[in-house]
Image (spheres, rainbow, N blue to C red):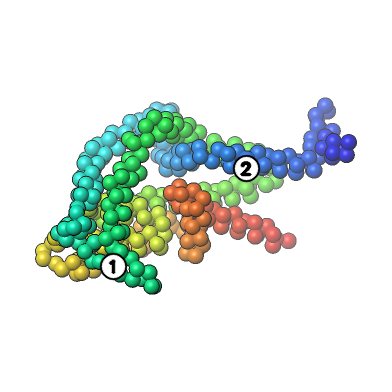
Amino acid sequence: MGLFKWFAPVKFQAYPGTYKFSFRAKIATLWIIAAIVLFFLFYFAHILPVFIWAAITAYLFSPLVNLLNQRTRLPKAVWITALYIVLAFVLYFTFQAIAPLISNEISDLASGSMEEPTTFLGRIASQGNFSVLGLDISLREQVNHFSQWVRSQLPQQAFPIIFGAAERIIILMIFFVVTFYFILESGNFVERFKAIVPHPYKQEISDLLDNMNLTLGAYIRAQVVLIIVMSVASFIILSLLKIKFAIILSLTTGILEVIPIAGPIAATAIAAIVALFQVSTPFGIPNLSLATIIIIAYFGLRQMEDYFIIPNVASKFVKVHPVAAIFALLVGGTIGGVLGLFLAIPTAAILKVFSEYIYLKLIED
């Protein structure tokens, strides 16, 4: 009986016949809702990535759709459909142009014999063994593992839709449908949330959400711009220097920009290693000199990124300490894989904004 008394509703005097929860009942209800949400996330976590990617995509294209809607007064659904059509054509022709080149580079990479020092993989394998901190590493064995991975795993991981059969196609369709509705309802989600916030806290919560929105928007815009700019710029440099596998290397360079600090270093190291071991070099430049030029060129790209792109795109909103960024990446990668890596830094930045808000609330009189 005591438990039922604890949850007993209280008569709401302003509206006869209606009741409101007691304070304890409210707390208990919040705990129950939290438990249900955690249960859902635990047992259905495998379906969340498609919704998260849809939300990210909608976040990218919603400003454009909203602008077109305001300028033309045409319904959002029309502009979303037009956007899908344009993106479909762009992706189709881009895939038609790039896919054969990537396939040729992968075939060239995988077909090289380790027994012939005149091939890229053979030249690496011929270097024998070396020791790092007392650990002996066989280059021939490592090259053999890499070659097998390129032949068997890379095509499936690079083009999962083609090799993943019906399930992945269904997931792709769900992604497009969910993205459509996310863009269509963009702005309404936040406004609905603000509408249920009690009036005394409405302005305060609205400011907090606006700060989070600025942080998240700045990060996503910065990452998309950096991936595109660094991929194109590195491809131009690698092509001019006639570095093998230029397309794969440039795409890898762009994608690794998502990972701060370690990503650009890894991209530079990979490109330099390819230059160091490729069989033919342009203009008779020695391999070591070619690798050095690659390192200098990538360093220059990094300076351009730090001083021109990031300040103008990310501005002052995304400020996460490098140590915190590395910790966030490790946690994100462990929990969510590739998606976790992509979301680690913006999540850390949003948590920073939220923690600053909580800190100010704690110290205020």
Q: Which residue is mark 1?
A: 129
Residue at the image position 63 percent from the left and 40 percent from the top:
39
The x, y position of residue 67, in whole percent, is 41, 38
Judge by depth and name the residue closer to the eye, 36 or 188.
36
C-alpha span from label 2 to label 1? 50 Å
Does any portion of residue 273 appear in the rendered image?
Answer: yes
Mark 2, mark 1: which one is toward the viewer?
A: 1
Q: How many marks?
A: 2
Callout 2, which amino acid?
Leu
How crowded pointer 2 is (Cα within 10 Å; few <14, some 14-19, many 20+) is rated as few
First in sequence: mark 2 vs mark 1 = 2
Residue 183 tag number? none
In front of the other: 281 or 228: 281
Q: Given the image, on which type of amino acid does mark 1 rest? A: Asn
Residue 288 place in picture, x, y as percent:
20, 69
Which SS class for mark 1?
Answer: strand
Say which of 285 and 223 sits in front: 285
From what the image shows, is residue 242 above or below residue 161? below
Residue 119 image offset from top left, x and y in percent: 17, 57
Please name the residue shown 23% across and 66% down the image. Answer: 127
Q: Quadrant of the C terminus?
A: bottom right
Residue placed under numbered mark 2 in the picture: 38
Q: Which quarter of the figure has residue 22?
A: top right
Please give left or right for residue 213 compared with residue 111 in the image.
right
From the top left corner, tell me how far across and down residue 215 is, in percent: 50, 52
